[in-house]
Amino acid sequence: MNKQEIMIRFTKLVAKRLYNHPNVKVYFNPDLIEEEKIFCGQNNMLIDYSIIYNENVFSEDDLYLGAWNIIVHEITHVEVLGHGKRFWKVFYKNLKKVDDLRKEFNKEVGWDEDFDFDFEDDIVVDGIDNYDYYLRTFDK
């Protein structure tokens, strides 16, 4: 099973566990770019029960280390649209609710079972961490 297939399987498991949505469609697209901003994922649950992940970030052979957080992030949009305070409160609660699945996911993609990605550790240019960069893509 390649890493995209693992993401598909766990996206469906998370959607089922958190919101009882067993039939989520999951796609990968290399063109998740809007106004020169690269997105890791896009939630279309209100339109057609689908999630689209950026194929450039999540390939068949390699995943961005924040993959688990992105899965839970996109599924959290089933409950809360946008990225206000309520979203982040629900997101962090959801991470806890599916922590056992995170450990399974980690093993299947070949990471240490206890690996828990922290955006703060993912430093990019000029000392800006990727979490802040990711959030700023929604500022406009």
Image (tube, helix red, strand yellow):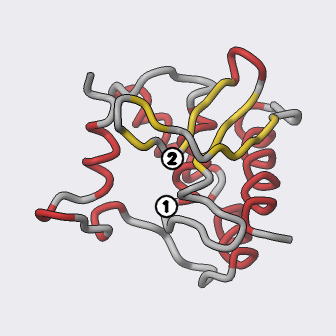
**Point 18% across, 58% down: residue:** 128
Residue at which label 2 appears: 40
**Image location of residue 104, percent across then percent down:** 73, 70
Amino acid residing under circle 1: Gly
Q: Which mark is residue 30?
A: none
| Mark 1 Cα-neighbour bin, 10 Å: few <14, some 14–19, many ≥20 | some
Residue 44's image quarter?
A: top right
Q: Is residue 11 above or below residue 20?
A: below
Q: Which residue is mark 1?
A: 66
On the image, which quarter does residue 22 sit in? Answer: top right
Q: Give the x, y percent position of residue 119.
A: 35, 61
The one of 32 and 140 positioned closer to us in this rendering: 32
The amino acid type found where label 2 is placed reads Cys
Q: Quadrant of residue 137?
A: top left
Callout 1 touching callout 2 (CB < 8 Å): yes
Quadrant of the image for the N terminus? bottom right
Instruction: State how far apart marks 1 and 2 are (Cα).
Output: 9 Å
Q: Nearer the viewer, residue 95 or 78?
A: 78
Q: What kind of element bears circle 2?
A: loop
Q: Residue at x 34, y 25 (%)?
A: 84
Residue at 32%, 68% in the rendered image: 122
> First in sequence: mark 1 or mark 2?
2
Across and down, in percent, residue 9 comes to 82, 54
As helix, strand or loop, the secondary structure at mark 1 comes to: loop
- Give the percent coordinates (x, y) of residue 101: 71, 61
